[in-house]
Image (spheres, rainbow, N blue to C red):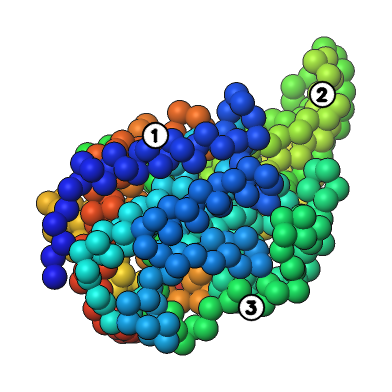
């Protein structure tokens, strides 16, 4: 069965829903909607209303994930999961997260209207805490759905000293019921998410949609460089132990290593603290961070080794001390190759080429991969801007993304994927 598509109408509906949800914010001046806040509650209620209007049964689990259920083959049939998140960063854009939820709702709504009866069910999921902005946690809602939520996270506190446990209770939830939020892995086929690219590749290639190959693994380091303070006017350049110059050379080494990598590695020095921080004193101590991401775990590990070797070489040459410590490590999550192919074929059916590209940003799929195979569809965003009020995806592109999900679902007849085409970490 091939459902007639009105791509322009789908895009217009998506844009209107984006605007409605984007108006819900803790600030009148910009969009901020944090996990388990009154704004999250209002947004969740709107999403639940949309799901019900689309013909889905609605529930909400103990972590606040709103679930829309469509089970034409019965509740015991296997199910396909489609979702994203509705929380935001501070001073956010409207599209990051909510668009994926909205496109899932619109796709299933068209299925219901057309009388499509697949031999599986579909659940549309609206997660919270993907951004990790309120609490020092992230992916807690999708982790609960995947059955891997760490109970220790309940003790995490926000900037006001409120624990995640207390916030859940205030939200009307019972933290003791979190284990019941997990799906039975035997009844889940796959998880698919549509998301704005948050980068410039699709726009540069002139394509509205892309297929994600993997969610990049990430390493974060703290590097401390120690030298010796001295008078800026009296210590000759050849006799200085300038910690900032050493740290700067190390930062350039990170850039050089990332640029030489064939897997699209990216490296960022996002913070640098200089002591004593006086205009007329040679810096004696610098602490800086490195965020290193790659779609290949092996490549990322090799880059870390190369950086450590370079940092010590620079420190020895400049008579400095250096200490490197890792404080964050996330493995690469490959997208299932069978799902990549199905999504690419769905886009091709609409007359477009879907470039393959990795995601350097984290997504709920990282948690959901512990439950089932995952696939991701990227949607072009203007200038590659995200986490910013200027974030924008056109109605035309959102309409195409909704249409691609519909074509994907139409062809997704098998209750099980071909495990021989699974992705594998590199």
Tag nearer the camera, 3 or 1: 3
Left or right side of 83 for 154 = right
Q: Which mark is residue 392?
A: 1
Examine the rendering and report whether any part of residue 294 can be seen: no
Question: Residue pushed farthest top?
Answer: 233
Q: Are marks 2 and 3 in contact (CB under 8 Å)?
A: no
Estimate how packed mark 3 is, as few (under 14), some (14 to 19) or many (20 or more) residues with alpha carbons within 10 Å.
few
Image point (49%, 65%), residue name: 58
Image point (47%, 44%), residue name: 96
Disc 3 target residue: 180
Q: How far across and down, in percent of the image, does residue 331 sit?
A: 55, 66
Element under disc 3: helix
Q: Earlier in the sequence, mark 2 or mark 1?
A: 2
Estimate how packed mark 1 is, as few (under 14), some (14 to 19) or many (20 or more) residues with alpha carbons within 10 Å.
many
Gap in angstroms between the C-alphas marked 2 and 3? 52 Å
Estimate how packed mark 2 is, as few (under 14), some (14 to 19) or many (20 or more) residues with alpha carbons within 10 Å.
few
Q: Earlier in the sequence, mark 3 or mark 1?
A: 3
Foreground residue among 338 and 310:
338
Element under disc 1: loop
Image point (87%, 23%), residue name: 230
Q: Which mark is residue 277?
A: 2
Q: How far across and down, in percent of the image, does residue 16 sit?
A: 37, 38
């Amino acid at each position: 069965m091939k459902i007639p598509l009105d791509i322009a109408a789908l895009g217009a509906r998506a844009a209107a829903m984006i605007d409605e949800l984007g108006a819900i914010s803790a600030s009148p001046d910009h969009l901020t909607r944090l996990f388990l806040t009154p704004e999250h509650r209002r947004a969740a209620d709107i999403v639940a209303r949309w799901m019900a209007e689309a013909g889905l049964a609605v529930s909400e689990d103990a972590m606040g994930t709103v679930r829309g259920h469509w089970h034409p083959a019965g509740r015991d049939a296997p199910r396909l999961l489609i979702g994203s998140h509705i929380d935001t960063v501070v001073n956010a854009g409207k599209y990051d997260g909510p668009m994926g939820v909205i496109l899932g709702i619109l796709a299933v709504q068209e299925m219901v209207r057309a009388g499509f009866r697949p031999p599986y069910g579909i659940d549309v999921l609206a997660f919270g805490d993907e951004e990790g902005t309120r609490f020092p946690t992230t992916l807690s809602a999708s982790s609960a759905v995947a059955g891997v939520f760490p109970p220790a996270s309940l003790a995490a506190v926000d900037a006001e000293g409120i624990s995640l446990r207390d916030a859940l209770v205030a939200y009307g939830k019972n933290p003791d019921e979190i284990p019941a939020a997990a799906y039975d892995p035997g009844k889940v086929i796959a998880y698919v998410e549509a998301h704005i690219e948050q980068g410039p590749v699709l726009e540069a290639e002139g394509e509205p949609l892309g297929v994600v190959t993997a969610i990049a693994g990430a390493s974060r380091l703290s590097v401390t460089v120690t030298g010796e303070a001295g008078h800026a006017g009296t210590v000759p350049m050849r006799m200085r132990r300038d910690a900032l110059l050493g740290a700067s050379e190390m930062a350039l080494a990170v850039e050089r290593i990332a640029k030489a990598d064939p897997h699209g590695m990216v490296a960022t020095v996002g913070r640098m603290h200089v002591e004593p921080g006086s205009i007329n004193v040679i810096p004696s101590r610098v602490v800086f961070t490195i965020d290193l991401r790659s779609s290949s775990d092996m490549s990322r590990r090799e880059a870390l080794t190369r950086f450590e070797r370079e940092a010590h070489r620079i420190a020895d040459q400049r008579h400095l001390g250096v200490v490197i410590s890792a404080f964050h490590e996330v493995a690469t999550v490959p997208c299932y190759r069978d799902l990549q192919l199905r999504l690419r074929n769905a886009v091709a059916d609409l007359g477009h080429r879907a470039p393959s590209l990795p995601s350097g940003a984290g997504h709920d799929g990282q948690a959901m991969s512990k439950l089932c195979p995952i696939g991701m569809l990227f949607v072009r965003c203007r200038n590659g801007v995200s986490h910013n009020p200027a974030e924008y995806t056109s109605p035309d592109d959102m309409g195409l993304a909704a249409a691609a999900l519909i074509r994907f679902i139409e062809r997704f007849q098998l209750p099980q994927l071909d495990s021989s085409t699974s992705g594998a970490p590199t």
